Image (cartoon, rainbow, N blue to C red):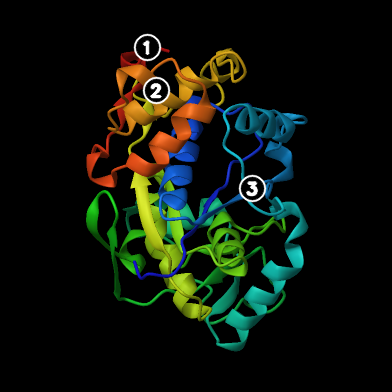
Amino acid sequence: MSTEQIVGRFAPSPTGPLHFGSLVAAVGSYCLARRNGGTWLLRMEDLDPPRVVPGAADGILFALENLGLHWDGEIVWQSQRTEAYIEAVERLRQKGLVFDCVCTRKEILLSAPHPGEEGPIYPGTCRSGPGAGQRPRALRIEVPQEQVSFCDGVFGPFQQVLSDSVGDFVLRRADGLFAYQLAVVVDDAAVGINQVVRGSDLLTSTPRQIFLCASLDYTIPEYIHLPMVLERDGKKVSKRHGSALLDYKSDAGKLIALALSFLGQIVPNSLLGAPPLELLPWAIENFDSQRIPVALEGIVASHLPL
């Protein structure tokens, strides 16, 4: 990372209350942005209306405020960013990088040569364009047979050949909604995000986002992926796993301390019962990314005294 001011962000999806896994990402991104006097922005990823839960965004904002995690500037709402996504797609179209696809999921599943990291790999059926009379369903970007590499701030070197791992991926879905991979890249670039801190479940998405950054002539940010919080059954902690039980008002200091401990930070005994107003300044000054545990499989939440 250069000496430029860090611009980090936290980007929750308002599909339910803030759960402990998201809290870890919020605390980690906050401390890593603030430790060198950087800014910390907030984006609501309400890109998929059917998944948005009424009142969830307000609940997340309430939690962040009670935790003392105060953001800079205005909140960005992805649902209000459609024009920016359209413009980005047009830029890619002018470069000849995107194509309309008429294939259904079933057709792709039947024709895919082998499974990829997130399902069947698109075999390139519509790269030369849909047949006469065929109605486009999705919009895809053509990926080259090249390796995308980067060095993650926690997990170190990571590489992926997109054509072998995911294939030509979707930018706009059949229902007309823009895909996460496009939206996150466009939104980060629009506000100058140069440090992306998030859960390691998105580690394999990063090469696609780097490829999109390069294709759109954006500056590629630094990436730092944090270990996942898992339930006892090995599944990622989600909004279905008791997140509503976390008391972000009465237990704010305790939850911050737990998140820091999860991230390998050694909180002094004198601060274990302190409110966020006292704990966060210490955390910002002393946060050490070298202490973050490297665990691609995640860490079981039941091991924490929640």
Q: Amino acid at mark 3?
A: Glu
Q: CA distance from mark 2 to mark 1?
A: 8 Å
Mark 1 Cα-neighbour bin, 10 Å: few <14, some 14–19, many ≥20: few
Residue at image coords 46%, 61%: 6
Going by the numbered disc 2, the residue's amino acid type is Leu
The residue that label 1 is drawn on is 305
Which residue carries the number 3 mark? 45
Q: Residue at x 61, y 62 (%)?
A: 187
Q: Are marks 2 and 1 in contact (CB under 8 Å)?
A: yes
Q: Are marks 3 and 1 in contact (CB under 8 Å)?
A: no
Q: Are marks 2 and 3 in contact (CB under 8 Å)?
A: no
Q: Amino acid at mark 1?
A: Pro
The Cα atoms of the two marked residues, 3 and 1, are separated by 30 Å
Q: What is the quadrant of the N terminus in the image?
A: bottom left
Please provide percent x and percent y for residue 154: 27, 49
Q: Is residue 31 left or right of residue 173?
A: left
The number of numbered discs placed on residues in the rendered structure image is 3
Give the mark, 2 or 1, whose residue is nearer the N terminus.
2
The residue identified by callout 2 is 258
